[in-house]
Image (tube, rainbow, N blue to C red):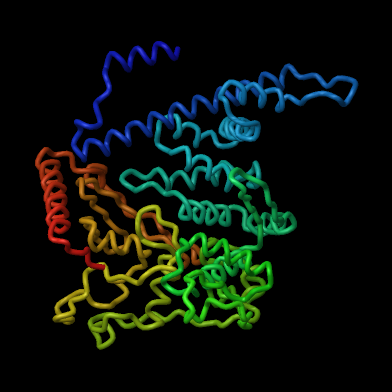
Amino acid sequence: MFDRLLRAVAEVGLPDAAAVPDADLVDLAVAWQRLETIACERKLAAAAELFDRRAAEHVDPPHTWHSTAHERAEAEVAAALSIGRRAAGRLIGLGHSLRTRLRRTREAMARGELSVQQVTQLDSRTTNVTDETIAAVETEVLSHVLQPGRHAVIGRRLHDLVDRVILRHDPEGIRRRRERAHADRCVEISPVEDGMAHLFAALPADGGRFIDGRLTEMAQGVCANDPRTFQARRADALLALCRGEHHLICHCESAGCPNSTDDHRLVARKTLVHVVMTEQTLTDPSDQSPAFLEGHGLIDAEYARGLAGDATIRPLRTPSSGPGKRALEYRPGRDLADLVRAIYGHCQWLNCDVPAWNCDIDHLKAFKWDDPESGGHTTLENLGPFCRGHHRLKTYGEWTIKRDASGALDFTAPTGHKYYTDRTGPIQHITGANTRPPSRDRQTAGRSTTPDTRRAARIRAERRRNRQRSEQAAGSEEPF
């Protein structure tokens, strides 16, 4: 079978990537990913079928010293695919789940409509959904994920979508999962190559967010001349905390640096995490509406009320619309910034999961410094969170971004490809508002494939390269 496939591909021929224009190169990568997904579905189906056959053949011997059907299939798959035992077990488990629980997901994967990452995430997030509700949960999730013209939902956005659907069909499900996971919290350290070790920790969500913020704070506490990377400083900060130190010692080797000593200055700390919930959830112990924990996703009401017990609580206020006095200032006020972050939850860029509270609040239409009244106002409709990297890319990367009336974004890449992503965030998730984007024509939401569009995209790309070469030759620096 495989030899016939290779011969068919050889007869058609494979395009030389070096000779393909930019726009077609992106299309080629998409086509190969779809083929990869289809092939992976067949691989998972074969692994699941092998397990089913070994299970049917298996008979428990009178003694206990024997291998299970899963171990037998696992060993065969691991040997054939040259992968480890655990990886083989994951393949068999995912294949079996697609065969028995997520049948519609398997069908979509076989058509190349879902990526391997999406399928793996769907399986993981629905592991504890009961047999009575899994079909309804799967159907509703796929109705959102497989909408024509919509950009793929992946990562934290898919995580939140699945949890929201589970809450609708099984309100107690997330709380039960949290209680089981809390009982299984752990810390594991395992050796790896080159004298290093890997650390894995399963912690309560608020504790994880606090540690993440504390490590970042310590890593940023050194001077600009510290030679370590940011991630290396975070690793050193974790060790410093375990040694009882309260700040990270700077490695700049400068005698005048105030952070180069180990004077163990005491720092009073209070957990800083952001939780978004309705007033009803906060004040009514019987209310079971979910809340949203920054950087994590949906949490159950009981957990959220526990976090709010000694927290600083600020109501979200909707500012007045129109170009008022504050709208003509570049920086938004705290109330407006809080509301923007609560609406979107994450960086607005495609597939970016950076929490909104770690992002810049950016103007979609550029603020007019010379004449603020002429446009680019600092209003709710014109603001959104973008992480620093995507903020720069939005400003200087030749992408075009437009927002429609629902708050959804249309992205146009330098190659002419178009991507549509709807607005989802904490407020939509916890209030149950319908976040489904309006129906979009596939041709309008997809890439424009006319020769003129491709030619224009190639011209823009060539001009960009020429400008970059000219700037380098003149010794100019890219603006920040």
Residue 220 lies, in percent from the top left, at: 48, 72
Q: In which quarter of the image is residue 367?
A: bottom left
Q: Is residue 362 above or below residue 199?
A: below
Which quarter of the rendering shows the N terminus? Answer: top left
Give the side of residue 135 with respect to residue 411, left or right.
right
Q: Residue at x 68, y 51 (%)?
A: 189
The answer to which of 340 and 400 lies nearer the viewer is: 400
Residue 433 in sight in this render: no
Residue 433 lies, in percent from the top left, at: 44, 63
Q: In this view, does 327 lie above or below 51?
A: below
Q: Is residue 345 above or below residue 198?
A: below
Q: How many marks?
A: 0
Q: In which quarter of the image is residue 285?
A: bottom right
Extreme residue in the right direction = 62
The answer to which of 357 and 79 lies nearer the viewer is: 79
Q: Residue at x 53, y 44 (%)?
A: 122
Residue 164 lies, in percent from the top left, at: 53, 56
Residue 255 lies, in percent from the top left, at: 49, 79
Extreme residue in the bottom direction = 325
Which quarter of the rendering shows the C terminus? Answer: bottom left
Q: In which quarter of the image is residue 302?
A: bottom right
Residue 126 in sight in this render: yes
Q: Which residue is drawn at 59% across and 63% down?
A: 299
Q: Residue at x 14, y 81 (%)?
A: 371
